[in-house]
Image: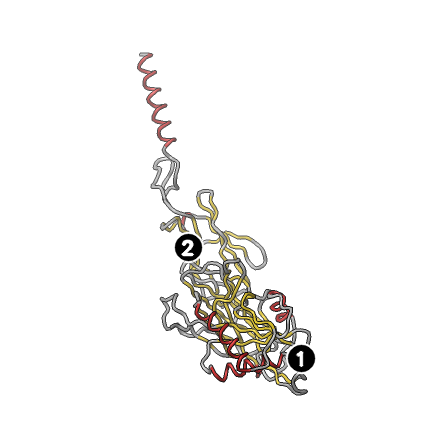
Amino acid sequence: MKAYIFKTLAACFLMAFTACSGSDGGDALPGTDPDTDPGTEIEGDLSLSVSGTVIEANGTDAVTIAVMKGKTDITSSSKVYVVSPSGSTESFQGTSFSTTTEGDYIFYAYYGGEKTEDVTVRAFKDIPALPADSKPDQSTDFVKRVLTIQHTGTWCQNCPYMKKGIEVYLQKNPDNCAVFVASHNGDTMAGDASNAVNSYLTVSSYPSLSVDLNASNMIQGALNDADLQAEQIAARINDAESNGCKTGISVAATEPEGKIVTVNVKVKSANVSNCRVAVWVLEDGIVAAQTGGSSNEVHNNVLRASCSTSAYGDGIQLDSDGAGQNVYRLDVSAVSDLSNCRLVVFTSVPNASNRFVVDNVVTCSLGGQTSFDYE
């Protein structure tokens, strides 16, 4: 009898040990009871996703929240939290989120003791509507445009030579791919935005001309032969265009309300993860005396304001499909005449030296729209 009891206890112990040692390597499917059913192991990483990163704060526009373990939807059995713009953290129930309060809402989730990365949904009022996308399922083959910056100042004796070279280039290339910007230094048209650009590129010689925020292809000084200067500019622009781009940009902007312009930007890419966006305000028709020029020189393409304190913009959150959206509100109080203004919007990505350079750029009028442009 004692031997029988001993064998029975030994068998129970062996069964218990086998059951415990086989429980590593995965989480139970939602709804299973680990005390009675070990469930099916789920393979893959834990992630929280949202159907969009920007919503209108009108109480009806909404995004869908989902928590995934690999390819398995585990939203109903996860613990989801949201941090409101006020900084308070609350448990989030359900799968749909809307709000009437502007600000950033940070979502994250826990499952099986593991935490997802944070995902931010930004809520804004009165967002200008983006234009229709002619190829909504496409994230490649965008038209490449080149950001070309003239580094200048009204005190600069030789800057008119660069300006003339640009004029000749535009005459010879009316359908060119370049977007020209004048970044001033040391005069009344200089400001935080232009100072940030000139500093980022460590511009020490005026005039200079840079392409796509890349200091390695900068032209320093100017030629007094406008045709030769135009050829030099064309060579830099054509070289940058030949590199192509990885991102597409769509923009919608409001007319100025007081001294604020609201800009809605969407970016698409098939193969970029670390992307930044900048929105610049340019002004034309500013009359100011120019050394080496005239006492009533007209200055165009003048960089007057930026959405970012950084020359290359701020990060944009891209979803698993490579799409991201953000809304920017720009203070245009420094602008002299808003009727002579337009927007330049560009994406930047890190190059081989881990410095951000421009990938693509578009322009947009105040109160206007710019669609994704495919080849």
Q: Is residue 244 left or right of residue 183?
A: left
Residue marked by disc 2: 66
- Label 1, secondary structure: give it: loop
> In this rendering, is residue 333 above or below 276?
below
Q: Position of residue 311 (x, y in %)?
A: 58, 66
Q: Residues within 10 Å of mark 2 (few under 14, many from 20)?
A: many
Q: Nearer the viewer, mark 2 or mark 1?
A: 1
- 347 and 208: which one is in front? 208
Q: Please state which amino acid type lies under the numbered disc 2.
A: Ala
Residue marked by disc 1: 157
Q: Give the numbered dot on residue 196.
A: none
Disc on the earlier residue, 2 or 1 = 2
Marks 2 and 1, how far apart at CA: 60 Å
In the image, what residue occupies the spot 62% across and 71% down? 194
Q: Position of residue 241 (x, y in %)?
A: 45, 71
Q: Position of residue 16 (x, y in %)?
A: 36, 27
Q: Please state which amino acid type lies under the numbered disc 1.
A: Gln
Q: Position of residue 337 (x, y in %)?
A: 61, 83
In the image, what residue occupies the spot 62% across and 85% down? 298
